[in-house]
Image (cartoon, helix red, strand yellow):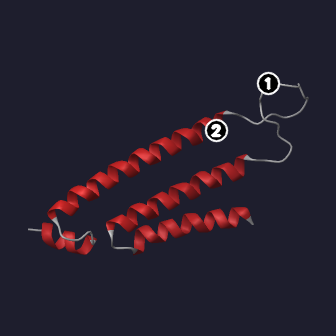
């Protein structure tokens, strides 16, 4: 059930990128899709019966791999920086155009 909700989040973000014409809505849709992809990775990586590798009482059993956690943290930081860069680009476009609708921007900038 959780996997279905996460995949629905990814699809909502994807269809938002495709169907929305406003650049701010496209940026928000990309963020939603990125969050869904990260959540899907976490859901897949969290399996029952795995212990976290934290110092303390030593238990015999399977330990969770800490490498996917580092990958997810890196993906979050990269996603944040890409979103900031896209917002700066949208701000630059907003200075030259009275609207952020992609159709109007294309009309104003085509020779």
Residue at (64, 55) in percent of width and height:
40
Looking at the image, residue 46 lies above or below residue 63 = below
Is residue 79 rendered to the left or right of residue 93?
A: right
Between residue 41 and residue 77, name the one nearer to us: 77
* Residue at image mark 1: 55
Q: Is residue 92 above or below residue 75?
A: below
Q: Dot 1, crowdedness within 10 Å: few (<14), some or many (≥20)?
A: few
Q: Secondary structure at mark 2?
A: helix
Which of the 4 quarters of the picture holds residue 101? Answer: bottom left
Q: Position of residue 17 (x, y in %)?
A: 42, 67
Q: Would residue 100 be found to the left or right of residue 95 on screen?
A: right
Give residue 30's position: percent from left, percent from top. 45, 60
* Residue matched to label 2: 69
Task: Name the quadrant of the N terminus.
Answer: bottom right
What numbered label is drawn on residue 84?
Answer: none
**Res. 54 image quadrant:** top right
């Amino acid at each position: 059930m959780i996997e279905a909700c996460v995949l629905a989040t990814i699809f909502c973000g994807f269809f938002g990128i495709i169907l929305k014409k406003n650049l701010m809505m496209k940026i928000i849709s990309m963020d939603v899709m990125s969050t869904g992809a990260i959540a899907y990775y976490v859901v897949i990586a969290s399996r029952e019966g795995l212990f976290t590798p934290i110092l303390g009482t030593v238990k015999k059993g399977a330990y969770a791999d800490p490498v996917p956690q580092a990958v997810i943290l890196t993906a979050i930081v990269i996603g944040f920086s890409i979103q900031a860069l896209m917002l700066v680009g949208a701000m630059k476009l907003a200075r030259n155009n009275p609207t952020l609708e992609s159709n109007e921007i294309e009309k104003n900038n085509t020779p």
